[in-house]
Image (cartoon, rainbow, N blue to C red):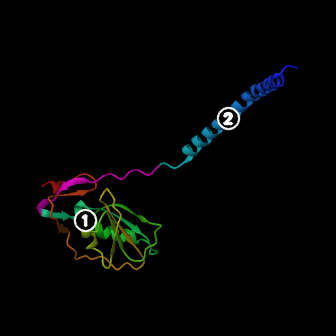
Amino acid sequence: MPRGAGRKGKAKVLGRVLRTLRTPLTLLVLLGILIYGAYWGWTNVVAPPPPPQPKPCVTQKVAGGKLKTSQVTVHILNGGKVRGLAGTVAQEMRAKGFKTSQVDNTEEAVTTTVIVGASKNNPEVKLVLSFFKKAKVREDKRSDRSVTVLVGDKYAGFNTKAKTSITVKAKTVCLPGTPTPSALN
């Protein structure tokens, strides 16, 4: 037997084995990719849609250097066990001129009143805060500049004597939605 003949024979056998296994292995890899693609597609089809992005605030003129309640959008959420509290607070706020866009319950349990807004120093947050007794402020850097009022079981009450406007230093403020006609005067 010539030298190297054994190696050539082994190489031929190995080559045949690899050619024989190449097609099934390729099909298995492609099947795995297909299964993963089907899984990925299905999970994206049945996944809930992402929440809508909050609308950015709109710059509005402040008539006479005062921000009015009619320019402020408020969400009122009940975080306690007192039924109808958010609705009652919403009625009181509407009577003072506020725009209420959401009145509902929240899963976040709160005991006292919490005012949630972009910053505690923003005029819309200060104006809303003035209407609630013993309320706390929580900042959340929201971009739409709305204000959320969370009321709980130890709701201290509504300040009916609070002023319906607040003095601001700037000539414009950034608030949700479109400018109100009174803000353009």
Magenta stretch, main secondary structure, is loop
The part of the image, by quadrant, that contains residue 93 is bottom left
The part of the image, by quadrant, that contains residue 25 is top right
The nearer-to-camera label among 2 and 1 is: 2
Total numbered circles:
2
Q: Position of residue 100 (x, y in %)?
A: 32, 62
- Residue type of the residue flagged with mark 1: Asn
- Residue type of the residue flagged with mark 2: Val
What residue lies at 28% left-to-right and 55% top-to-bottom?
176
Above or below, 179 against 147 in this view is above
Badge 1 marks a residue whose secondary structure is loop
Q: Position of residue 72 (x, y in %)?
A: 26, 62
Region in magenta? 50-64
Q: Tell me if mark 1 has few (under 14), some (14-19) or many (20+) residues whose alpha carbon lies within 10 angstroms of its own.
A: some
Badge 2 marks a residue whose secondary structure is helix
Point out the tag, 2 or 1, that comes first from the N-terminus: 2
Screen quadrant of the N terminus? top right
Q: Position of residue 184 (x, y in %)?
A: 15, 54
Circle 2 sits on which residue?
29
Most extreme residue toward the right, as rendered? 1
Closer-to-camera residue (119/31):
31
Screen quadrant of the C terminus? bottom left
Circle 1 sits on which residue?
122
Closer-to-camera residue (82/30):
30
Question: How much space separates mark 2 and mark 1, taking CA atoms?
Answer: 58 Å
Most extreme residue toward the top, as rendered? 2
- Residue 50 appears anywhere in the view: yes
69 left or right of 27?
left
**Magenta stretch: residue 47 in it?**
no
